[in-house]
């Protein structure tokens, strides 16, 4: 067997056997197969596609390409949550404490942000003192004690995905459904939870631009999860504008606290409650998704969800007082107000452009080693459907650097489309698979 033969088989539209896939994944992780050959294979896969069986096999090989997490010591049905990546998406900060307050153990490994989407770990690090690096023993002990821990991905988890994702990123092969499904599900399966709730984003600011594509990706991931014996449920949610009003790390934690207090923008509140409700159902604490959502609403109303977030922050060395006084989450000192040049209804806010603007402020990374400005970002004052007068405030840009703030300001202006007619109501949750 050799790599050239494997590339040729896929180039001609053939189906790779489990041993051919194993040869490629093992050889690549071991550094025996060069990037240029794997690039050629990825492009052949991009055009010829993988069958569902090949995708499931590739996922499995990637899952076991490095360490796996064993959560069996923690009693109960452990539930993980994953989003395919959205701008302003702070649902983990809300749904995870809600689910944990309803008795669902949440042992979650999250990522750092790269590109125009933010990462949960960067958001948590905007809380003074919060430690995102715990040892495996500390991580498990904390979930046993308080029912929740959120840490950065540590150790040698799914090295095949790390290498393949970095290569896909520079060879224009990221947006293939099989490769996305294998990438996400290999990480979720290696992370050891019993059930997985996926938030598949659909729209302009997402990998999946159409509902049909989002459904196909969701079914693929749900089938892979089920095949591995893990209950997997996917929510397809709209990504045609940023989620909520806050984009940027400290700004997003402030908004998450508002939602946990029963306030804040309705879109992020609705999606977080749905995801938490599904987590509660997947964790077998509710008999249906509707019942899970009712429990999630009650956890917000009673203050139990906010108390759990406080407990999580305290357990990981952070300042729990941010839950009572969000001004303790420092914002960058250079602030520019963006005013509307037009009058009319906001018809669109391009999420990708707002994400780029946020990256320009210093809230996101351009390369993986960049330092993040935790107080930087964008606060939207107008969302799709709102009426705006000429000169009215559209958004505020925060940065520690005035040049960066001005560059972000230009991007924010470009992201708004304002017209005479009001756009039709957008459905936030499009399907559950
Ligand atoms: N998120 C991932 O983890 N992998 C992908 O391929 C796409 C989104």
Image: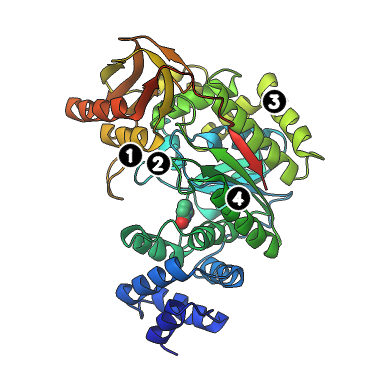
Q: Secondary structure at mark 1?
A: loop
Say if mark 2 contacts mark 4, CB within 8 Å: no
Upstream in sequence: badge 2 or badge 4: 2
Q: Which residue does the numbered mark 1 point to in the structure image? A: 364
Q: Which residue does the numbered mark 2 point to in the structure image? A: 117
Mark 4 neighbour class, 10 Å CA radius: few under 14, some 14 to 19, many 20 or more: many
Q: Residue furthest left?
A: 403
Upstream in sequence: badge 4 or badge 3: 4
Which residue occupies the foreground of this view, 31 or 168?
A: 168
Which residue occupies the foreground of this view, 217 or 313?
A: 217
Residue 128 is at least partly visible in this image: no
Upstream in sequence: badge 1 or badge 3: 3
Say if mark 1 contacts mark 2, CB within 8 Å: yes
Q: Secondary structure at mark 2?
A: loop
Q: Position of residue 363 (x, y in %)?
A: 32, 34
Mark 3 neighbour class, 10 Å CA radius: few under 14, some 14 to 19, many 20 or more: many
Classify residue 377 by image quadrant: top left
Q: CA distance from mark 4 to mark 3?
A: 27 Å
Q: Which residue does the numbered mark 3 point to in the structure image? A: 297
Q: Position of residue 228 (x, y in %)?
A: 67, 64
Mark 2 neighbour class, 10 Å CA radius: few under 14, some 14 to 19, many 20 or more: many
Q: Which residue does the numbered mark 4 point to in the structure image? A: 215
Q: CA distance from mark 1 to mark 2?
A: 8 Å
Q: Quick check: 264 above or below 154? A: above
């Amino acid at each position: 067997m050799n790599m050239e033969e494997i590339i040729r088989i896929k180039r001609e539209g053939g189906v790779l056997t489990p041993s051919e896939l194993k040869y490629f994944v093992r050889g690549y992780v071991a550094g025996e197969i060069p990037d240029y050959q794997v690039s050629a294979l990825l492009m052949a896969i991009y055009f010829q596609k993988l069958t569902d069986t090949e995708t499931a096999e590739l996922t499995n090989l990637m899952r076991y390409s490095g360490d796996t997490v064993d959560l069996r010591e923690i009693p109960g049905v452990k539930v993980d949550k994953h989003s395919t990546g959205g701008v302003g998406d702070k649902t983990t900060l809300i749904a995870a404490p809600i689910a944990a307050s309803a008795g669902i153990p949440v042992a979650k490994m999250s990522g750092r942000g790269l590109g125009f989407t933010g990462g949960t770990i960067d958001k948590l690090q905007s809380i003074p003192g919060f430690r995102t690096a715990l040892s495996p023993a500390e991580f498990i002990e904390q979930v046993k004690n308080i029912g929740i821990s959120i840490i950065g991905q540590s150790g040698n988890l799914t090295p095949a995905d790390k290498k393949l994702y970095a290569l896909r990123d520079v060879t224009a092969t990221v947006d293939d459904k099989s490769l996305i499904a294998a990438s996400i599900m290999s990480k979720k399966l290696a992370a050891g939870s019993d059930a997985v709730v996926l938030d598949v984003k659909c729209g302009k600011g997402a990998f999946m631009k159409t509902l049909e594509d989002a459904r196909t990706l969701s079914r693929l991931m749900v089938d892979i999860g089920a095949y591995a014996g893990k209950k997997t449920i996917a929510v397809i949610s709209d990504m045609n504008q940023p989620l909520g009003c806050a984009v940027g790390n400290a700004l997003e934690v402030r908004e998450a606290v508002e939602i946990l207090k029963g306030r804040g923008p309705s879109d992020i509140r609705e999606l977080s409650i749905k995801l938490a409700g599904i987590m509660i159902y997947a964790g077998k604490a509710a008999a249906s998704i509707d019942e899970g959502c009712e429990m999630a609403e009650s956890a917000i109303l009673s203050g139990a969800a906010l108390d759990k977030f406080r407990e999580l922050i305290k357990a990981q060395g952070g300042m729990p007082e941010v839950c009572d006084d969000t001004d303790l989450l420092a914002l960058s000192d250079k602030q520019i107000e963006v005013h509307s040049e037009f009058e009319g209804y906001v018809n669109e806010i391009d999420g990708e452009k707002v994400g780029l603007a946020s990256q320009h402020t210093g809230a996101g990374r351009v390369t993986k080693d960049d330092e993040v400005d935790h107080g930087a970002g964008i606060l939207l004052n107008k969302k799709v459907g709102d009426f705006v007068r000429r000169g009215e405030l559209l958004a505020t840009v925060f940065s520690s650097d005035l040049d960066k703030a001005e560059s972000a300001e230009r991007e924010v202006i470009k992201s708004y489309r304002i017209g005479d007619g009001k756009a039709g109501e957008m459905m936030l949750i499009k399907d559950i698979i």
